[in-house]
Amino acid sequence: MQASFSRDHLKLVVPSLFDLCSDDSTNLERWRRDLFALLDELEGNAWDQFSGDAPDVLRRVSHCVTVLRTLFSVISEKKSGFSVARALLEIVCDIESAAVFSPAFYAEIITLFAGVQGALTDTAIISDDHGDNELEGREAAILRSNQLDAMVKRVYGFMDRYSFGLDPETIARRDLRRKRIQNYFAVDDNQWQDWRWQIEHIVQDVETLSQVLTMSPAERDAVDRARDNTLPFGVTPYYLSLMDDDELDLRRDAAVRAQVLPPPEYVEQVVESRIETGDFSGLDFMREEDTSPIDLITRRYAAICIFKPFNTCPQICVYCQRNWEIDDAMAADALASPAKIAAAIQWIAAHPAIREVLITGGDPLAMSDELVERIVGQVAQIPTVERIRIGTRTLVTMPMRITDRLAAFLGSLRQPGVREIVVVTHIEHPYELTPDVVTAVNRLRNQGISVYNQMVYTFFVSRRFEAALLRRCLRQIGIDSYYTFNAKGKEETLSYRVPIARLVQEQAEEARLSPGIERTDEAVFNVPGQGKGYLRSTRKRNWIGLDPDGARVYEFFPWEDGIVKVAPAPYIARDIPILDYLERLKNIGEDPADYQSIWTYF
């Protein structure tokens, strides 16, 4: 795939571009004017050719022209720090360049110019052929119904490839896994179902991990290196039981392992960052310190704040946005001092504009019952707080934590019409769902507590209809989808990242192929220091540049833009090259043709 995108391919797709070269081709501004004129000409030709019978083609023509005009503009060069117009001048006119242009760079340029000419292949995952458009009434309805059946069959064909934690075969396999771990720890079923036992036996060293889990050499070395350098790490015995002992290559448990087993490159970059800064503060991607008006509080939005009384978790997600401030799994000093907790609660009470408090951290439900009841109870006493949201992964990492006592306490704080109690969890993949998770969710819902899920759209959950299957399964057990986060642009988590276009593609193309109640989540990009940038509309972002490696450069506008007179400055983000992502999918057995329309999402 990579080899097909080159200067020769570009010349084949848009030969008129190469006719622009002249003796004065080193003049960038003249070249820029010629590029704009060529775009006008190509767009006009496309309208003459496709006008009247191909509105979808003409829409793509207009979109591609707009993008190329933006990429070629002077202002985009200043914002992105790289001139796409000059790069094209050097490539087309065969001028020596200091930059090395990757196949992914050529792929973007070639695709855009093909789009301008109405030749951009937009192969949808589901055929949009409606057959005989002359039919009406019942005949038309029957034909459409048959086509919809074919669509669903195609969708389910993708979903059936992915493992589901509630499948009887999976449950039986995990029973054996659990028994292996129980035998190692010499623990019975009652102890296993005690969340306090789970916390006391969190696995944090590679020796123990190797005894209860089949690991590849790379996984073992990465964990060993992480622990040697005191990187936060820990996995509950329960979560280890979700991992398989076989299939070390194309694993059905890849998304589960990716949660907690750090890739080697992640470990190296985190270690290097600490060497440079002396601590992990350089990994504060979201700039939480810039939005913390008082210790333990983060406030990015008008009516909600984050309250972090407990700064650790039973296990550490590799790509967590707060792992820079967590010392270790269940670190002994994770609980904030009584004075800081009291000050934070007083601060919330002093700001009546805040109607919702998200208690997170760390994972607040890893605290004892007594601490949860005391701290959450104090927040509930603030009369201006209408909603308390608990951010926790315990439903996934140790669902036995949701005891009858805990559920009853949270339910007791709920006062319809006065105060709502909500639990928001983080489930990444259908393979994480188990009977224990179902039991935990039922306990909460029986108390009138809504449960929501937010996932991070990483490479390991980005195959066709993989996330859609998760949303479908979540609804079946009583969890509402909430947010799908584009994986943050942290360099140390590069192997987790997915192009923005892939998430936008999924949300757009799969939206009508699932019942609406299964797709209620919102796709967002977390803008450092500002918060969520919604991906549903290009009004909040603009594709302004293209790096030599083929990475799109986006400008994200702050949520305050248009709401207040002076908003924070836009944020410039560099994405993952689409061609590289497709190559990676191909390497795990996916057919890039199934993702072809990704190029049309900007």
Image: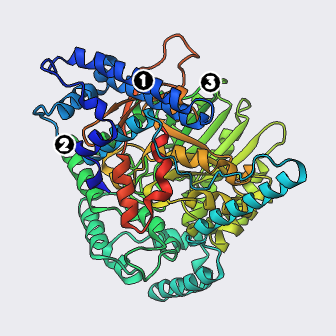
Q: CA distance from mark 3 to mark 2?
A: 39 Å
Does any portion of residue 599 appear in the rendered image?
A: yes
The reply, left or right, for residue 588 in relation to residue 87 is right
Q: How many marks are shown on the rendered structure?
A: 3
Q: Position of residue 168 (x, y in %)?
A: 65, 82
Q: Position of residue 126 (x, y in %)?
A: 61, 56
Q: The disc labelled 2 sits on which kind of residue?
A: Glu
Q: Which mark is residue 587?
A: none
Q: Please, what secondary structure does the residue beneath circle 2 have?
A: helix
The reply, left or right, for residue 211 in relation to residue 186 is left
Q: The disc labelled 1 sits on which kind of residue?
A: Pro
Circle 2 packing at 10 Å, graded few (<14), some (14-19), many (20+), is few
Circle 3 packing at 10 Å, graded few (<14), some (14-19), many (20+), is few
Residue position for label 2: 276
Q: Which mark is residue 570?
A: 1
Q: Position of residue 19 (x, y in %)?
A: 24, 27
